[in-house]
Image (cartoon, rainbow, N blue to C red):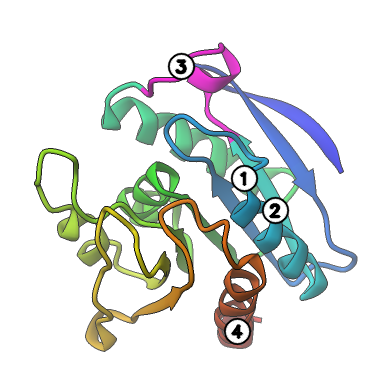
Amino acid sequence: MSVIVLDTAQGGARVHLHPAGDPVAGLVLGHGAGGGVAARDLVAVTKVARQLGVSVALVEQPYRVLGRRSPPRAPVLDAAWVAIVQQLAEGPLAGLPLVTGGRSAGARVACRTAAATGVVGVLCLAFPLVAPSGVSRQEELDDAGVSVLVIQGESDRFGIPEPDPERSRSVVVVRGDHGLKADPAAVADAAATWLMVQIARFG
């Protein structure tokens, strides 16, 4: 594992690179709004992805690198993410089909920027479907425009999205809540099954 810093208009982003031997794809994952890249579900997915030959980049957004817990507005987050993914695609993950994703807020960013980053799929860990205000974020999932996997805890307080075959969206429900800490093995298994399909499509 190595750590690099990538420049964005919002400041430096810290990227934890977990390369696979002779990689067949790249996976770029972001953290939750107030969390970091050591979250249990991110760690579980990183491990299984590397076993499949997928190099993983765990990204700390600039606001977290600066020590802030509250994220900036969505357009600011998205702009930084696009810049990060583009630099990874031109550097450590060059020549690989890319999947992006993340947990909670990181999953939202990946969905909103899927077209701009040119990725082949989005992996959502605990997508926060309903905001605390009660507003639905369904549109962010629907507009991703690529294959999407949502892994959701059965008692997630933010709700559980519905699968949508027409939009190539799959949903796997596992034990636990929004933190996805109860059954990391189930999270890893669901991610591995979906990633193998993406690798087969674009390998």
Residue at image position (60%, 84%) is 193
Magenta highlight on residue 201: no
**Disc 4 designates what residue?**
193
Label 1 crowd bin: few (<14), some (14–19), many (20+), radius 10 Å: some
Q: Are marks 2 and 1 in contact (CB under 8 Å)?
A: yes
Q: Secondary structure at mark 1?
A: loop
- The spot of residue 192 in percent (x, y) is 64, 77
Asked if residue 16 shows in the view, the reply is yes
Between marks 1 and 4, how big is the CA–CA gap? 21 Å
Q: Give residue 91's position: percent from left, percent from top.
A: 72, 43
Q: Quadrant of residue 161?
A: bottom left
**Nearer the camera: disc 2 or disc 4:** 2
Q: Nearer the viewer, residue 124 or 200?
A: 124
Q: Nearer the viewer, mark 2 or mark 3?
A: 2
Q: Position of residue 123 (x, y in %)?
A: 48, 64
Secondary element under disc 3, as helix, strand or loop, is loop
Gap in angstroms between the C-alphas marked 2 and 1: 6 Å
Q: Toward the viewer: 75 or 193?
A: 193
Which class describes the residues within 10 Å of circle 4: few (<14), some (14-19), or many (20+)? Answer: few
How far apart are the alpha carbons under marks 3 and 4? 35 Å
Residue position marked by numbered label 2 in the rendering: 43
Q: Amino acid at mark 2?
A: Val
Magenta residues span: 60-71
Which residue has dot 1 on it? Answer: 39
Task: For the residues labelled 3 and 4, say whether their Cβ atoms are less than 8 Å apart.
Answer: no
Q: Secondary structure at mark 4?
A: helix
Q: Do the residues bearing badges 1 and 3 touch, measured as CB atoms within 8 Å?
A: no
Check the image and report above or below for 35 versus 47. above
